Image (cartoon, rainbow, N blue to C red):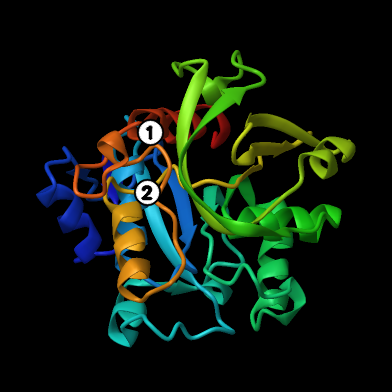
Amino acid sequence: MPIKVPAGLPALQNVIDEGCAVQVLEAPTAHTLRVALLNIMPMKETTEADFIRLLATSDEEIELTLLKLDTHTPRHANPEHMSRYYTSFNDVRNSRFDGLIITGAPIEKIKFEEVTYWDELCGIFEWARQNVTSTLYICWAAQAGVYQKFGIQKHLLPAKMFGVFPHTIAKPDMPLFKGMDSTIYVPHSRHTTLLREDIVAEERLELLSESELSGVYIMQEKGTKDFFITGHSEYALYTLDGEYKRDVAKGLPIELPLNYYRDNNPTNEPVNRWQGTARKLFDNWLKYYCK
């Protein structure tokens, strides 16, 4: 629950305004976990709030550092916001962190090597192996991570994977899944996927959770505390609603998000199927893998 973020960060106040019981940590203590968020999503403040909302529900003391790439200037981010609240990766490359979260990015259809900041990102992946206790690779970052580390390629889907999908857990006794039900729900919003057969054929990876509908969800690199997560456990309740209505307004081909609106009616409220599980996932990560 106690969390320290860059002073004045609007996302923290947004989370507090939502009614989340957040205690602002004034000064780190010997027990404080140092967590970095490499945020490469275009809507910076939304993504900040998503992860702060989850991290702040843990009993662990957390000092959060927002990281930005040195070789990429985000087009949709406020330069003043980035300058004030974000730290360049070059400024922390000699530091150690207990946890690192690397977000996705809406660039799935671009080949990895054609991403303008690919070389820097690969360098961060390598740096994290030596300087971070546990890393979470989220959505596109999960695909990028398994490609860079294991040569496993992503594949274009015939239609967007969009909705809230049920998943099974292969190893329910793992600390990562402590307190979770045998079936968990997770939002997905992506145009590409990883193939199950590629994951299980890679002996350095272990498949921990998957869905018959949306495919592989959580993988762990054996012998490490690093996890590759293809879904968006961090999403707020209305995120998929915003994506759906945005695409409808643009006239883009988009199906209703599966298992999301009550009675599958977009005029109804979304059904909150995943946020309790998301809080457990991040709390377990902090407690059992970042130390």
Q: What residue do we see at 67% from left, 75% from top?
A: 110
Which residue is labeled 2 in the image? 235
Whether residue 87 sits left or right of residue 100 in the image: it is: left
Whether residue 159 sits left or right of residue 170 in the image: it is: left
Q: Earlier in the sequence, mark 2 or mark 1?
A: 2
Q: What residue do we see at 68% from left, 38% from top?
A: 219
Secondary structure of the residue carrying numbered label 2: loop
From the viewer's perspective, is residue 185 above or below residue 67? above
Horizontal and vertical percent for residue 177? 53, 22
From the viewer's perspective, is residue 103 above or below residue 42? above
From the viewer's perspective, is residue 4 above or below residue 277? below
Horizontal and vertical percent for residue 40? 49, 69
Which residue is labeled 1 in the image? 274
Residue 247 found in image quarter: bottom left
Horizontal and vertical percent for residue 197? 83, 39
Foreground pick, 116 / 121: 116
- The answer to whether residue 28 is visible is yes
| Residues at discs 2 and 1 in contact (Cβ within 8 Å) | yes
Q: Residues within 10 Å of mark 1 (few under 14, many from 20)?
A: many
Whether residue 268 sits left or right of residue 92 in the image: it is: left
> Mark 2 and mark 1: span between their CA atoms?
9 Å
